Image (cartoon, helix red, strand yellow):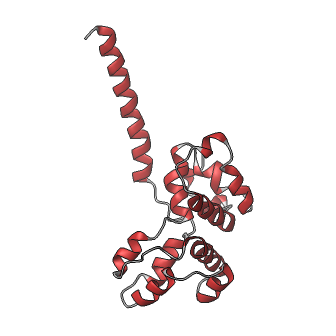
Amino acid sequence: MSRRDIFIWAAIAAVVAVALLFFALPAGAQSFDFMPPGGRALLVKELGAPGKQARLQEVVQSRKTEPEWQAAFPDLSPKERATLAAYLAGNMPLAGAPAASDDLVARLPPDGRELAINECQSCHSLFTSYLTQSRDAQGWRNIFLSPFHRQMKLSPQQREEFARYAALNMPMKVADVPEDLRF
């Protein structure tokens, strides 16, 4: 191996190491508890506890409209009801739901909050490009029309889930976002 090849491999290794640190540290160090819960989180909070498996099984096997789902969860706040209803209307019924509730919870599709955390910040900050943006659902759907967003490996259902969650829960107040994420 020539000196040039060694230099190239060393440079590649350095870039990979820096990239791994850049992407690993923020993900491990950040808590996103400040963001409003998504539909999956709300469903698990409401029906994921022991003793509620039959109701959870019933919910994931049902197809209802958003207004029907909102009426099914009267104890939640209006924003939480709307977020959960949008999630359920867009993702239910689950195909071939298993009998065990643990398996059922694991099979629930990711919600809009999870999609934002896991997909968006690999390319840009959540703060300026997401948390502080005010758009309706169509405005968020339009985000996926740009060339680099079209290339994201999200299903149409996941894109819709993201758009509905974002329209219902964004923008956030700057004061609600941790200072280390305001860039």
Residue 110 screen position, x and y as percent: 49, 64
Query: Which residue occupies 68% across, 83% down?
Result: 67
Residue 18 screen position, x and y as percent: 40, 33
Q: Is residue 157 above or below residue 43?
A: above
Task: Residue 75: name its quadrant.
Answer: bottom right
Task: Residue 11: name its quadrant.
Answer: top left
Q: Residue furthest front?
A: 96
Query: Which residue occupies 55% across, 63% down?
Result: 113
Asked whether the viewer can see residue 133, the reply is no
Task: Residue 116: name its quadrant.
Answer: bottom right
Asked whether the viewer can see residue 173, the reply is yes
Which of 169 and 154 lies nearest the eye of the viewer?
154
Q: Is residue 148 above or below residue 62?
A: above
Image side of residue 131 versus residue 46, left or right:
right
Residue 124 screen position, x and y as percent: 57, 44
Q: Quadrant of the C terminus?
A: top right
Q: Is residue 87 above or below residue 135?
A: below
Number of numbered markers: 0
Query: Which residue occupies 42% across, 36% down?
Result: 19
Residue 152 screen position, x and y as percent: 55, 47
